[in-house]
Image (tube, rainbow, N blue to C red):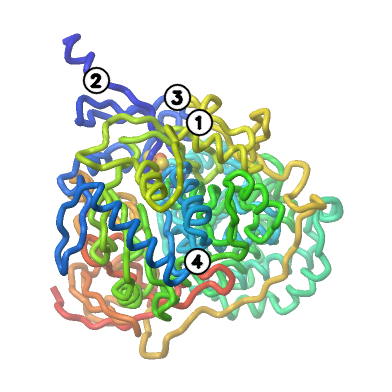
Amino acid sequence: SAMRSSRIKRTKTVCTYCGVGCAFEVWTKDRQILKIEPQTEAPVNGISTCVKGKFGWDFVNSEERLTTPLIRQGDKFVEATWEEALDLIADKLGAIKQQHGPDSIGYIASSKCSNEENFIFQKFARAVMGSNNVDNCSRYCQSPATAGLMRTVGIGGDAGTIHDIAAADLVMIVGANPAESHPVLATRIKRAQKLRGQKLLVLDLRKHELAERADLFLRPNPGTDLVWLSAVSNYILEQGWEDRSFLQNRVVGLEEYRASLTPYSLEYASEKTGLSREQLIEIATMIHQAKSVVVCWAMGVTQHLGGTDTSTAISNLLLLTGNYGREGTGAYPLRGHNNVQGACDFGTMPAWFPGYESITDESVRARYEAAWAVKLPPEPGLNNHQMIETIHDGKLKAMYLFGEDMGLVDSNSNHVDSAFEKLDFFVVQDIFFTRTAQFADVVLPAAPSLEKEGTFTNTERRIQRFYRALDPLGDSKPDWEIIQLVANRLGANWNYQSTAEIMAEAASLATIFAGVSYDRLAGWGSQVWPVQADGTDTPLLYTERFAFPDGLARLYPVEWTPPFQPGAEYDLHLNNGRLLEHFHEGNMTYKSKGLTHKVPSEWVEISPELAQERGVQSGSLVRLTSPYGSVKVRVEVTDRVRGHELYITMNTTGDGAVNKLTSSYHDKVTHTPNYKEMSVKMEVLEQK
Ligand code: SF4
């Protein structure tokens, strides 16, 4: 009836799962979520969505939502009022800062939360508390890609948009599984393949869906991507296939780069990577013959001891062949969380102000000091990896973390747990009582995206608004309101009435956001940074200049670091990654009944060869043991993996699995854990 339909509310939102950034309307009636309806106006996805965006929203009404602040009393948590919780936080953080100095507290931001929330969180850490100890979960994923791109082209983001990925002549996918991790982006590739014969080259350990559809799918040995990339570059130079005019006009460093490739002959690469000479030549030939090339990569590249160097090698190869600054070209590190790009962009990193301006640059600091009327700390702070070590050293005493389940996603969880236990005071702010929250002293109930306004930035650097569809559940509050309450208790005098005001402040301070505004972003609008003051945005980077003072790109020589090997008894390599139906650690998707019913628990994939060797079959129970811990898990036998390669999902229903096994070793440059370099031994517990 008319009365009933008049109570239905339609609200534009942006997906809260992956970095593709699909937008759609959510239909609600009271607190009921009726459906998701995509619209042609959505700049990234049009009328497409994937299963998570379409059906993954009932976590919002889960009975497990936190609806009131909680305070630890001994081993228990008791419900508290906001006044009580905020008083306690102000007392404790204030006293710890006084006694041990501003750098005795660490701040962990959220890649699930909005740009505005991340902006005021880093402002809180820096301007109110006086510390640059602020970081976000990109440290666990794409920080190496950011660093590799900063070395070579100057901006740590995708070179173009998903339009360019679809428009490329050749798409190369290295260490990424877009069909499951970035589904709507993968459908653009599938469509381009079908409609105009786009070529697809996949290099991965595991035969995932796009690998099956690739023109060429190759499986290099684990941790050897830099070797084949360098050999391919070397071969391209030997053949004279490099783009000479591009190199002459737009790039510096060719001779040093050429010299650095000398060790990477086809013979050497073939020995290290397990790819044949012919296969290496075929990669080079496909790149040479394509008019435009994009490379997409993810954790398979970055989560290694040499993750930054391999990301650099990818960018070097693109520069060598002139594949930047034109439609259908460039580097695309695929961003995981819906707003991991934005969390970095808006300054929740220990060495950067918003917009990647350096903490150590006096003129930048002076700009922020003038605007915020405070003196700011001049040295980079601790990243999240260093925070854990500094707790163990007894120097970091407290943490404030929001919207991030660090106790589940950080590597070597036994080591992380024991750090959390040593903290004098720990504030966790989330929508659920996460694994990390078990270690907290105060837990603050936050509100998910459907219950607040803000903006997210997707993998393309595209900023989009989301609107409030529902009121916050119970006593929960939007994260930006909570951060403001905490800041004001600790001496700030903030009076933000809306997220629009926060964005206006960010735009007034960070050069790359100069022309970003809520008016320009209204409705289905979007802006891809850098955005000039007049509102002109930049979907495709580097058309005229690279982001260095002289406008020229840098070929940056790198060397291979062999992958970590814990010892011969750990005879199986364990890879890990995502799964279509669940997202990351599964905190939201496991609360969504429809999704959990489909995929109830996790498993380890093993190859038919290994199954035969060890006498197991699908359903057998095994124990995997690394030097850092062990887990029990069921087996699935599949030819997606081969030989002594195992694959385990990073999603988990319970106490975490993969990170009981991973180490604290990390990328040399960015400290991203080497999640993809774990080896284990396997015992059979139950044949089935
Ligand atoms: Fe959401 Fe990503 Fe799926 Fe789009 S592809 S609906 S952004 S999870």
Q: Nearer the viewer, residue 403 or 208?
A: 403
| Residue depth check, mark 4 versus mark 2: number of the one nearer the observer | 4
Q: Is residue 267 left or right of residue 207?
A: right
Looking at the rendered image, the quarter that the C terminus falls into is: bottom left
**Distance CA(mark 3)–CA(mark 4):** 41 Å
**Distance CA(mark 1)–CA(mark 3):** 8 Å
Residue 355 rendering spot, x and y as whole percentages? 61, 48
| Residue depth check, mark 1 versus mark 4: number of the one nearer the observer | 4
| Residue depth check, mark 3 versus mark 2: number of the one nearer the observer | 2
- Residue tagged by mark 4? 383
121 vs 673: above or below: above
Q: Is residue 553 left or right of residue 230?
A: right
Q: Amino acid at mark 3?
A: Thr
Q: Amino acid at mark 1?
A: Pro
Q: Amino acid at mark 4?
A: Asn
Closer to the N terminus: mark 3 or mark 4?
3
- Residue tagged by mark 1? 43
- Crowding around mark 2 (Cα neighbors within 10 Å: few <14, some 14 to 19, many 20+) is some
Q: Is residue 78 left or right of residue 537?
A: left
424 vs 530: above or below: below
**Distance CA(mark 4)–CA(mark 2):** 45 Å
- Crowding around mark 4 (Cα neighbors within 10 Å: few <14, some 14 to 19, many 20+) is many
- Residue tagged by mark 3? 40
Closer to the N terminus: mark 4 or mark 2?
2
In this rendering, does residue 168 appear at all?
A: no
| Residue 397 image-quadrant placement | bottom left
Closer to the N terminus: mark 1 or mark 2?
2
- Residue tagged by mark 2? 8
**Distance CA(mark 1)–CA(mark 2):** 25 Å
